[in-house]
Image (spheres, helix red, strand yellow):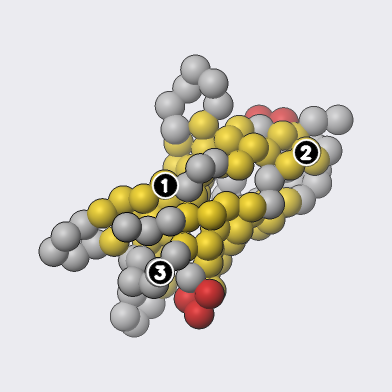
Amino acid sequence: QVQLVESGGGLVQPGGSLRLSCAASRSSIDVMGWYRQVPGKQRELVATFTSGTSATITNYADSVKGRFTISRDNAKNTAYLQMNSLKPEDTAVYYCNARALGPVPATYWGQGTQVTVSS
């Protein structure tokens, strides 16, 4: 079992920045990512960071490309989401996601952190 602890959400004005953090309770997580959800809509992918033996792969939703950056500190088992140039439509609950691939795949979710972009 993996516990994910998120932090960094809050209220910010349009054009501002926030950084979300997600600390995993153990290593050996192949993919860490962020999803978001607003009431009445499905949870959607924001960004993922896949750690490979020879390279890392990042993936972003079109709506956040050029504004958000996902990164990972393997020594701390922590993923980050740097969000710049925030827009009101970025308002949502952001969930950290962790996936272990391999013979026994597993998926874990954090508790969610609210991000509100408003003047």
Q: In this view of the protein, which residue sits in the foreground, 113 or 70?
A: 113
Which quadrant of the rendered structure holds the N terminus? bottom left
Alpha carbon separation for disc pair 1 and 3: 14 Å
Tell me the tag on residue 25.
none
Query: In terms of sequence position, does the residue under pointer 1 or pointer 3 come before the other?
Result: 3
- The residue at the point 59 percent across, 45 percent down is 64
Tell me the tag on residue 11.
2
Query: In terms of sequence position, does the residue under pointer 2 or pointer 1 come before the other?
Result: 2
What amino acid type is highlighted by mark number 3?
Arg
Q: Is residue 76 above or below residue 99?
A: below
Alpha carbon separation for disc pair 2 and 1: 22 Å
What amino acid type is highlighted by mark number 1?
Trp
Residue 59 seen by the camera: no
Residue under numbered circle 1: 109
**Disc 1 on helix, strand or loop?**
strand
- The residue at the point 40 percent across, 69 percent down is 26
Query: In terms of sequence position, does the residue under pointer 3 or pointer 2 come before the other?
Result: 2
Q: In this view of the protein, which residue sits in the foreground, 107 or 65?
A: 107
Q: Nearer the viewer, mark 3 or mark 2?
A: 3
Residue under numbered circle 3: 26
